[in-house]
Image: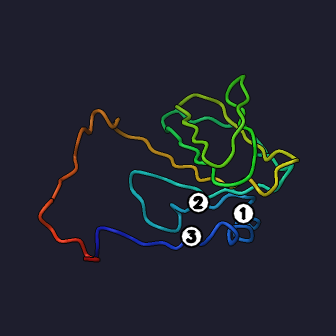
Amino acid sequence: MTGYDVYELGGLDSWAQAQADAGGKRFVDKEIPTEYVGMSANALEPGGQAPFWHSHDRLEELYVFLAGHGQMGLDDEVVDVRPGTVVRVGPGVMRTWRCTPDSPEPLRWLCVRGGGDTLAAIGRDGQLDRERTMPWA
């Protein structure tokens, strides 16, 4: 058993069918074992929207938008999203999203979820090795 897993999610264009079968959402953490972090890959066609609002009591989420144009409802505000937009949503914030009708392509994004201890509480837990040869050298 190794301490890592490799999973091929496929290119953005390959997401459509897998997500159509699951209402536009694919929980990657159900397909690859994760312990501390969760992730879903998401897609909505132009004019599509989430069927609900939701919030989390303990989880923080990062929405990383990769394609298309859309909007997120965050409590009482609406923010525009496009490729390159990253939205952090903390616990207790109600959220929803849509792909605008005039979007040139489907809205596609990753939602990364995490909970547990804060990064500040964990601190710097990385180990540097400046002597190890790079594998592609």
Q: Quadrant of the C terminus?
A: bottom left
Q: Secondary structure at mark 3?
A: loop
Q: Is residue 3 left or right of residue 27?
A: left
Q: Position of residue 106 (x, y in %)?
A: 77, 57
Q: Residue furthest top?
A: 76
Identified by mark 3, the residue type is: Leu
Q: Answer with mark 3 or mark 2, whichever residue precedes in sequence.
A: 3
In the foreground, 131 or 106: 131
Q: Position of residue 83 (x, y in %)?
A: 65, 49
Identified by mark 1, the residue type is: Ala
Categorize mark 3 by other alpha carbons within 10 Å: few (<14), some (14-19), many (20+). Answer: few
Q: Quadrant of residue 79?
A: top right
The span from disc 1 to disc 2 (Cα, nearest Å) is 9 Å
Residue at 57% over, 49% down? 111
Q: Secondary structure at mark 2?
A: strand
Identified by mark 2, the residue type is: Phe
Q: Secondary structure at mark 1?
A: loop
In the foreground, 93 or 108: 108
Q: Are marks 3 and 1 in contact (CB under 8 Å)?
A: no
Q: Is residue 32 left or right of residue 95?
A: left
Residue at 72% over, 22% down? 76
Q: What residue is shown with label 1?
A: 22
Q: What residue is shown with label 3?
A: 9
Q: What residue is shown with label 2?
A: 27
Q: Position of residue 113 (x, y in %)?
A: 50, 46
Residue at 58% over, 38% down? 87
Q: Answer with mark 3 or mark 1, whichever residue precedes in sequence.
A: 3
The span from disc 3 to disc 2 (Cα, nearest Å) is 11 Å
